[in-house]
Image (cartoon, grey):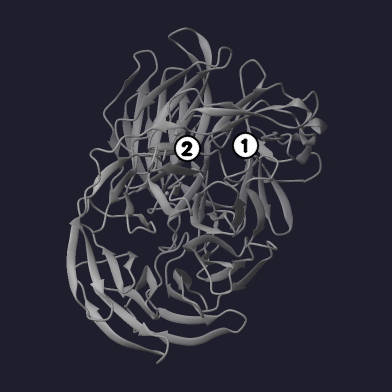
């Protein structure tokens, strides 16, 4: 599963709102020549703060707001912000994109756990400003949230092993305590709670869900609560869990049930309502003030005088994170009618633009209040339509108007398909009816998917759940009559469903499915799907199938040398196929194939300008290719 100069805008009631943007000069490595790709630069830059705490810095004895930043596809960092002066320090990690795991060990060491390709544990000596050698958790991709328990050791959860880990900062000893669920389908152990002396609590999922408790003295891991419970709070007095019947409380010493009366009022406040009515999480600083992060900005504000005031909106001053944002993976690419390139970040919920004429770029603030990333980007009615994970959000942004996401004006949230659908896996396309269509994957722990459409004029949102039961929609395309989509067995929080048959589907707006072609079990379809020259091309295994809408059948299948997840339209009848190391052309009528150029690894996104110029991305790098 991540950034700028800022524009200062004034909101209602004279509130000064810092809106994230980035304008920079970005030179080509060389002037583009026909058939020779060149590096355009790294215009996608943002912050994606996954964890935060505070420290008393031993270097100057001043309190610092500590942020852990995830830089998707690149190297993450931690950031120290002086809570009085606002000055920041930036410390890149030795390796790894970043982390949810962050622990302050006695204002002496900072413990950081990273994701996504390999789970690394990093230890930063605050006084020396030096990183220790990384610790590798074998077989794990993610460290999730971490906590400091009563034995002065750091505990954390993992993916995909669903384990509990233990790290002793005093001895530098790391242990994997084993899987916390007996269900082999469960891959997640998150979050971990360490506030109750003698115990560590960990939630697991997503095939089945529940809570385990680790007894520090005995080393035993046992069930806690009831199946499907989730933890709401753990402290030195009680444990609060959520279940369908409501909240339940347990004694933090004996782990025995408690009466519900009187304990809910004692629960810690963790969120404050800001000026637009949105709830933001915070930590409490040593001086009693509250510090939090909203997207690309941070805030420090006075705490409300009493508990009731936490639900009263507070005008917080959002300030830019005071260090340079790193480059991050480009998730999606498109272009506007003027030839400007638009894209989204691989994690961090921001978008960017790049002007090929001036070589300048800009990066936005968060496009919505939910975390995640923008998958779908389509221009319709001269406005940019966005679809985003994790809230199933559908937004419209007008580049010609001032940015005002905080006021839900620009970009404007026009609807959501959550909770049933959360991940716009297939991204978005412009349909034959003029609406923007998106293909979705279901919520965590559920096999399934769906479609949504947004009318660019009326902004009406419609959705269809599970057109192919228990399969996500992975690819989507359109011609002047139909929507086409492919399905597969991937799901959020679950292993791939090997028992299903993937489908190629023809969907007519206003009617629904008009053609459904299932494939044999074991044949996986993906996002590579393109309507071109009256035909439809899609990928499976190391093959491309070509579907004829007129004959309503697959007319031929063409072998290719490598796997592809991305197809582009190079000309009227020519498809561009991105493999792991090359861009290959395919004439859909003649079947003729030729290598156009080499590419630097897996290409994540691409767009083709009206003059045929191709822009494509590999991680954070944007490349330009002029066709002959």
At mark 1, the secondary structure is loop
* Few, some or many residues within 10 Å of mark 1 (<14, 14–19, 20+): some
- Lateral position of residue 81 relative to residue 266, left or right: left
At mark 2, the secondary structure is strand
Label 2 vs 1, first from the N-terminus: 1
When asked about the image quadrant of residue 164, the answer is top left
Verify CB contact (< 8 Å) between mark 2 and mark 1: no
Residue 319, position as x, y percentages in the image: 59, 25
Residue 526, position as x, y percentages in the image: 37, 69
Farthest residue to the bottom: give it: 551
- Please tell me which residue lies in front, 158 or 128: 128
- Please tell me which residue lies in front, 529 or 58: 529
- Please tell me which residue lies in front, 461 or 268: 461
Residue at point 22% right, 81% down?
590
- Lateral position of residue 391 relative to residue 627, left or right: right
Using the image, tell me which numbered label, if any, was put on residue 516. Answer: none
Residue 151 visible somewhere in the drawing: no
The residue identified by callout 1 is 253
Could you tell me how far apart the alpha carbons at marks 2 and 1 are, in whole angstroms? 53 Å
The residue identified by callout 2 is 362
Residue 491, position as x, y percentages in the image: 46, 65
Tell which tag, 2 or 1, sits nearer the viewer: 2
Residue 584, compared with residue 81, is above or below; it is below
Residue at point 36% right, 83% down?
547
Residue 156, compared with residue 103, is above or below; it is below
When asked about the image quadrant of residue 548, the answer is bottom left
* Few, some or many residues within 10 Å of mark 2 (<14, 14–19, 20+): many
């Amino acid at each position: 599963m991540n950034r700028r100069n800022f524009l200062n805008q004034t909101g209602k009631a004279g509130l000064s709102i810092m809106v994230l943007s980035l304008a920079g000069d970005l030179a080509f490595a060389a002037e583009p020549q026909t058939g020779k790709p060149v590096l355009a630069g790294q215009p996608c830059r943002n912050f994606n703060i996954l964890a935060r705490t505070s420290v008393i810095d031993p270097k100057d004895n001043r309190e610092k707001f500590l942020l852990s930043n995830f830089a998707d596809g690149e190297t993450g960092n931690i950031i120290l912000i002086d809570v009085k002066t606002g000055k920041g320090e930036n410390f890149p990690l030795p390796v790894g994109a970043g982390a949810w795991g962050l622990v302050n060990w006695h204002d002496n060491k900072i413990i950081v756990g990273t994701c996504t390709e390999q789970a690394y544990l990093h230890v930063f000596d605050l006084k020396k400003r030096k990183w220790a050698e990384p610790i590798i958790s074998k077989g794990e991709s993610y460290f999730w949230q971490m906590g400091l328990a009563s034995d002065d050791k750091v505990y954390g959860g993992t993916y995909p092993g669903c384990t509990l880990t233990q790290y002793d900062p005093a001895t530098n000893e790391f242990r994997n305590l084993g899987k916390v669920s007996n269900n082999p389908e469960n891959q997640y152990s998150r979050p971990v709670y360490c506030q109750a002396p003698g115990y560590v609590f960990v939630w697991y999922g997503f095939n089945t869900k529940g809570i385990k408790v680790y007894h520090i003295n005995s080393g035993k891991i046992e069930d806690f609560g009831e199946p499907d419970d989730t933890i709401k709070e753990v402290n030195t007095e009680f444990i609060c869990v959520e279940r369908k019947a409501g909240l339940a409380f347990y004694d933090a010493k004996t782990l025995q049930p408690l009466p519900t009366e009187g304990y809910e009022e004692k629960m810690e406040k963790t969120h404050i309502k800001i000026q637009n009515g949105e709830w933001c999480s915070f930590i409490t600083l040593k001086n009693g003030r509250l510090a939090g992060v909203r997207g690309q900005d941070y805030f420090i504000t006075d705490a409300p005088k009493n508990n009731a005031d936490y639900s009263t909106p507070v005008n917080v001053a959002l300030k830019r994170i005071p260090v340079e944002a790193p480059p991050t993976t480009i998730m999606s690419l498109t272009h506007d009618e003027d030839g400007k390139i638009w894209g989204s970040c691989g994690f961090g919920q921001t978008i960017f633009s790049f002007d090929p004429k001036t070589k300048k770029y800009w990066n936005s603030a968060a496009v919505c209040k939910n975390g995640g990333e923008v998958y779908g980007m389509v221009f319709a009615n001269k406005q940019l339509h966005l679809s985003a994970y994790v809230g199933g959000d559908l937004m419209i942004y007008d580049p010609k108007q001032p940015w005002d996401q905080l006021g839900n004006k620009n970009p404007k949230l026009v609807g959501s398909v959550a909770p049933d659908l959360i991940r716009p896996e297939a991204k978005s396309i412009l349909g034959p009816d003029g609406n923007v269509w998106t293909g979705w994957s279901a919520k965590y722990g559920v096999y399934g998917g769906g479609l949504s459409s947004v009318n660019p004029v009326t902004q009406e949102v419609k959705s269809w759940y599970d057109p192919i039961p228990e399969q996500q929609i992975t690819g989507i395309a359109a011609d002047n009559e139909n929507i086409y989509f492919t399905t597969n067995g991937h799901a959020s929080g679950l292993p791939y469903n090997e028992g299903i048959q993937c489908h190629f589907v023809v969907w007519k707006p206003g009617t629904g499915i008009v053609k459904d072609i299932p494939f044999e079990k074991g044949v996986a379809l993906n996002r590579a799907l393109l309507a071109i020259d009256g035909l439809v091309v899609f990928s499976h295994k190391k093959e491309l199938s070509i579907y004829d809408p007129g004959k309503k059948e697959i007319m031929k299948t063409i072998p290719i040398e490598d796997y592809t997840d991305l197809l582009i339209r190079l000309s009227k009848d020519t498809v561009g196929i991105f493999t792991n190391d090359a861009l290959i052309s395919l004439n859909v009528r003649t079947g003729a194939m030729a290598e156009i150029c080499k590419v630097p690894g897996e290409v994540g996104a691409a767009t083709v300008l009206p003059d045929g110029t191709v822009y494509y991305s590999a991680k954070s790098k944007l490349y330009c290719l002029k066709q002959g």
